[in-house]
Amino acid sequence: MAPEMQLTISFDRPKFDNLKEVIRHVVYSCGKPAKNIAADLEMSPPELTQILAGSDGRRFPAEKIPDLIRSTAPRGHMLIYYLVDQFLSNEVDRKARALSAVETLLPELQKAVKVLNG
């Protein structure tokens, strides 16, 4: 029996006010221990925690964003989606992506419906 695959597509705008919120969400929701992420970023766990908390006005170093995306993938891809949405998207573009996704998925959905109907 082939393993099941799940595809999740969201066409909603990200619910974050700023990039720092996305970074914090990615780190804490990716399922990887923060100490491992810190090691991937060549930081100590307390240093990463302080940066995420905004302690002492510290900010996440821009040069570490690609490493964070790799370390927390696939959840880390939210950073890319957030930036694309903020700077390269508008409502028309989002609707076009949604339509394209539907057009791409439609043949597979039609096959699945045929299988279900026997």
Image: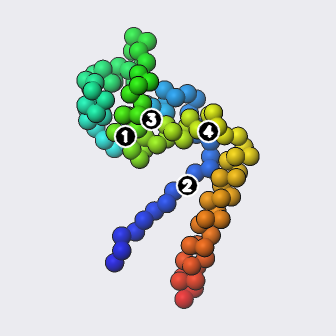
Kind of element beneath mark 4:
helix
Task: Please report the residue visible at 34 percent of the width from the left and 78 percent of the height from the top.
Answer: 1
- The residue pinned by badge 4 equals 85
The residues tagged by marks 1 and 2 sit, at their Cα atoms, a distance apart of 20 Å
Residues at badges 1 and 3 in contact (C-beta under 8 Å)?
A: no
Q: Residues within 10 Å of mark 4 (few under 14, many from 20)?
A: some
Left or right: residue 43 compared with residue 69: left
Answer left or right for 1 relative to 113.
Answer: left
- Alpha-carbon span between mark 3 and mark 4: 17 Å
- Is residue 53 at least partly visible in the picture? no
Q: Amino acid at mark 2?
A: Ile
Name the residue beneath numbered marker 2: 9
CB of mark 1 within 8 Å of CB of mark 2? no
Q: Residue at x 43, y 44 (%)?
A: 75
The mark found on residue 57 in the picture is none
Q: Residue at x 28, y 38 (%)?
A: 33
Residue kind at label 4, given as amino acid type:
Asp
Distance between mark 1 and mark 4 Cα atoms: 20 Å
